[in-house]
Amino acid sequence: MKIRNGFVSNSSSSSFIISSKNDGKKSIEVRTDYTFFDEEDLKEYYIDDYGFTEDDFKKAKEDKKSDYNKALKEIKKGNKISFVSIPWSEDTDKQISDITAIKTNKIIGEM
């Protein structure tokens, strides 16, 4: 039996929301599914992928713990937001450690 410590997921991959320094590049040091540089891009993603309405955005902005609100705050600080999926394997924890070892990267949510 395998026991996994650290981030736990019921799927075959783990997905994270990463805030990092906005260097204009679309990826960070691992496979990046989506990268957002501004509020409009982030908002468009939430409309297209999650079906967000104006009411949903209002609720998300009021909920300080919502992933949308966290991502929006990081963008307003001048950072970029990357959604990253890491397939589960024996080295998943190492990949996560590699992401956070870079001082300008910060995991702000798990999807």
Image (cartoon, helix red, strand yellow):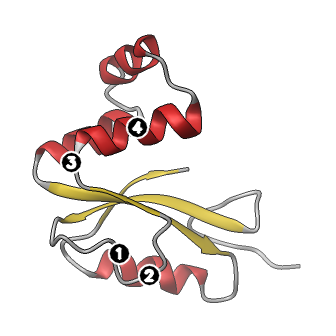
Left or right: 30 as drawn, with respect to 72:
right
Which residue is the site of mark 4?
44
Where does the image place residue 7, in percent across and percent down from the top left?
57, 64
- CB-based contact (under 8 Å), mark 1 and mark 4: no
User: Mark 2–mark 1 contact, CB under 8 Å?
Assistant: yes
Above or below residue 76? Residue 100 is below
Q: Position of residue 46 (x, y in %)?
A: 47, 36
x 76%, y 57%: residue: 10
> Who is closer to the viewer here, 35 or 96?
35
Under mark 2, the amino acid is Val
**Amino acid marked by disc 3:** Glu
Q: Residue at coordinates 10% horizontally, 48% vertically from top-left?
A: 77
* Foreground label between 4 and 2: 4
**Quarter of the image that includes the N terminus:** bottom right
Instruction: Tell me what residue is drawn at x 35 percent, y 15 percent.
Output: 58
Amino acid on which the number 1 mark rests in the picture: Ser
Q: Secondary structure at mark 1?
A: loop
Q: Are marks 3 and 4 in contact (CB under 8 Å)?
A: no
Q: Earlier in the sequence, mark 4 or mark 2?
A: 2
Place residue 40 in its image quadrant.
top left
Question: In the rendering, at what x and y percent does residue 36 appear?
Answer: 31, 54
Residues under labels 4 and 2: Cα distance? 24 Å
The alpha-carbon separation of the residues under discs 3 and 4 comes to 17 Å
Q: Residue at x 55, y 80 (%)?
A: 93
Pointer 3: what residue?
A: 74
Kindly state the secondary structure of the residue where label 2 is placed: loop
Which is closer to the viewer, label 1 or label 4? 4
Q: Callout 3: helix, strand or loop?
A: helix
Mark 4 closeness class: few <14, some 14–19, many ≥20 residues within 10 Å = few
Can you tell which mark lies on residue 30? 2
Residue named by callout 1: 27
The quadrant holding residue 85 is bottom right
